[in-house]
Image (tube, helix red, strand yellow):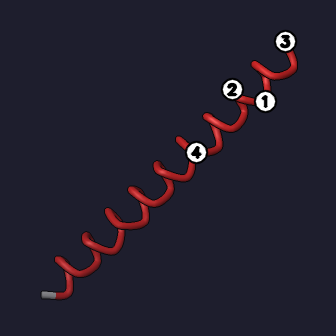
């Protein structure tokens, strides 16, 4: 039981980290695009 909960927790952390990385990348691209215009 405990190991299954840990696996779910790790998966959740990985998914939230992915979302954060995607958001950060889009924010950086948007910032660079705004600066060039």
Query: Would residue 13 be found to the left or right of residue 22 on screen?
Result: right
Residue 15 numbered mark, or none: 4
Mark 1 → mark 2, Cα distance in angstroms: 5 Å
Query: Would residue 33 be found to the left or right of residue 1 on screen?
Result: left
| Precedes in sequence: disc 4 or disc 3 | 3
Q: Report how many numbered discs are placed on residues in the image.
A: 4
Q: Quadrant of the N terminus?
A: top right
| Precedes in sequence: disc 3 or disc 1 | 3
* Disc 4 secondary structure class: helix
Local crowd size for mark 4, using a 10 Å CA cut-off: few (<14), some (14–19), many (≥20): few
In the displayed image of the protein, which residue is found farthest to the top?
A: 2
Q: Nearer the viewer, residue 6 or 22?
A: 6
Identify the residue under disc 1.
7
Query: Would residue 21 be found to the left or right of residue 35 on screen?
Result: right
Identify the residue under disc 2.
9
Identify the residue under disc 3.
1
Mark 2 → mark 3, Cα distance in angstroms: 12 Å
Mark 4 → mark 2, Cα distance in angstroms: 10 Å
| Precedes in sequence: disc 1 or disc 4 | 1
Q: Nearer the viewer, mark 4 or mark 3?
A: 3
In terms of image quadrants, where is residue 14?
top right
Name above or below for residue 34 compared with residue 16.
Answer: below
What is the x, y in percent for residue 4? 81, 22
Q: Nearer the viewer, mark 2 or mark 3?
A: 3
| Precedes in sequence: disc 2 or disc 3 | 3
Mark 4 → mark 3, Cα distance in angstroms: 21 Å
Local crowd size for mark 3, using a 10 Å CA cut-off: few (<14), some (14–19), many (≥20): few
* Disc 2 secondary structure class: helix
């Amino acid at each position: 039981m405990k190991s299954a909960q840990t696996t779910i927790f790790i998966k959740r952390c990985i998914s939230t980290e992915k979302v954060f990385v995607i958001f950060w990348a889009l924010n950086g691209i948007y910032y660079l695009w705004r600066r060039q215009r």
